[in-house]
Amino acid sequence: MELAFDIAPNSTLGLDFAGALQLTVNRDGLRLSRRGLQTAEMHHRYWRGEARRLRIFIDRSSVEIFINDGEGVMSSRFFPGYPGAAHLQRCDAGGILPLAAAAMHGRISVLLSGSRVLMKTKRVTIKDIAELAGVSKATASLVLNGRGKELRVAQETRERVLAIAREQHYQPSIHARSLRDNRSHTIGLVVPEITNYGFAVFSHELETLCREAGVQLLISCTDENPGQESVVVNNMIARQVDGLIVASCMHSDADYQKLSEQLPVVLFDRSPSDSALPLVMTDSVTPTAELISRIAPQHADEFWFLGGQPRLSPSRDRLAGFTQGLAQAGITLRPEWVINGNYHPSSGYEMFAALCARLGRPPKALFTAACGLLEGVLRYMSQHHLLDSNIHLASFDDHYLYDSLSLRIDTVQQDNRQLAWHCYDLLSQLIDGQAPEPLQRYLPATLQIRHP
């Protein structure tokens, strides 16, 4: 946190720190008080010139003050809880020093007489910039909104206003912009698990798109808990997001159908109950079937499937693709080949451990329905020295680290950049009141074949 105080000659500067500490600086010196009781002083005789610039650091036990008198910088540390416990030291001459008060955001008030002070703990406003530049608020507003040249504000004035705005780290008020546009320029992303590699990459791609468009992205996680999903969605609404992008763990889209009457909602990755809401998903069935049909002829007697929660549409779609791929290879799926848990790595570990215990060996061929499940499988294999075993691994979702493994893994790779772009495109059009076409988009995936 940063403050900057210029102290003019023959002026008095008073600071009140949340009612607990009071600091007064004038031509006679500096006085620090704690709840009305004087605890330390720094008299004018301790510096040689006029005090010009002040810097303050505050922690839980002390206050450190730096004063630049034009000839050098003097520092003093006070301990308000212990009257008289202070020490002084002179430093070599320094440049202009800012005033900073740590951990005091929004709790510092300024009282001044005869000096111009700008506090950077508070948002710098157009009025502040106008006063520092010596122009009207209207002129400063025109310049800062990029209309100064158009409305014939002098170039020297424009440059002065912009220079001061840069020096003071001025940022336009998002609240004023929201009132003007009737938008918050904020959208919400709700995902089951931010540490999931696929959701993490998607979030990064979406945040990049939002940032480039001047939109703030808020992200919340549900941990695959419908109750928690309701809470985080309500929190997003309370923050007045312009729209939502959601990978829902709900059994039904009824709540989102109702919400979509007031707020644009785009579902992605999952489709609860064959929803008619705007939707972006990867076509899981076709590429999974293609991958399995290529592998299955080599493992007609045994090909296992580790999946997530069957109630989720990606689980159903990937199992459907697995089944179709076996059928295309002339193999009938055996019910015992399908094992379901959830998408956490721990679930993949436990399912694979149980399978190895049942067989007394690693399986000959295995397809995991998500990157997280494969992570658990690989952890078990590493711990039990199975990475050199003769197992054909395949998975839905790719990871760049798979190229670095001696163990070859064939995968279905989603295009997270395209998923993010289509979600953003749909939501942006809905926010603008348009009717995007198509409303539901199924994107292709590619195969990454690493086995010869």
Image: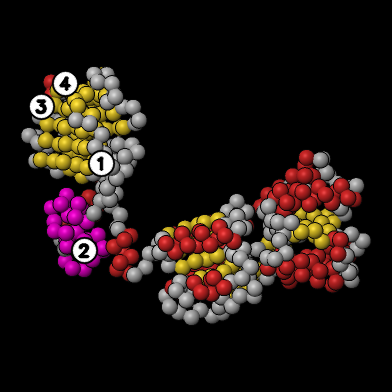
Toward the right, the furthest residue is 301
Amino acid tagged 2 = Leu
Q: Which mark is residue 108?
A: 1
Q: CA distance from mark 4 to mark 2?
A: 46 Å
- Residue drawn 60% across and 51% down? 195
Q: CA distance from mark 4 to mark 1?
A: 26 Å
| Of pointers 1 and 2, the one earlier in the residue sequence | 1
Q: CA distance from mark 1 to mark 2?
A: 30 Å
Instruction: Report the span colored magenta.
Output: 126-152
Task: Report the quarter where the N terminus lies.
Answer: top left
Is 304 left or right of 95, judged from the image as shown?
right
Q: CA distance from mark 3 to mark 2?
A: 42 Å
Categorize mark 4 by other alpha carbons within 10 Å: few (<14), some (14-19), many (20+): few
Q: Which mark is residue 142?
A: 2
Q: Does dot 1 land on a helix, a strand or a loop?
A: strand
- Residue drawn 21% across and 68% down? 150
- Residue drawn 27% across and 26% down? 80
Categorize mark 2 by other alpha carbons within 10 Å: few (<14), some (14-19), many (20+): some
Q: Which residue is mark 3?
A: 28
Residue 334 seen from this side: yes
In the displayed structure, would residue 86 be above or below residue 429?
above
Toward the left, the furthest residue is 10
- Name the mark nearer the viewer: 4 or 2: 4
Q: Which residue is mark 4?
A: 46
| Of pointers 4 and 2, the one earlier in the residue sequence | 4
Name which quarter of the figure residue 446 lies in. bottom right
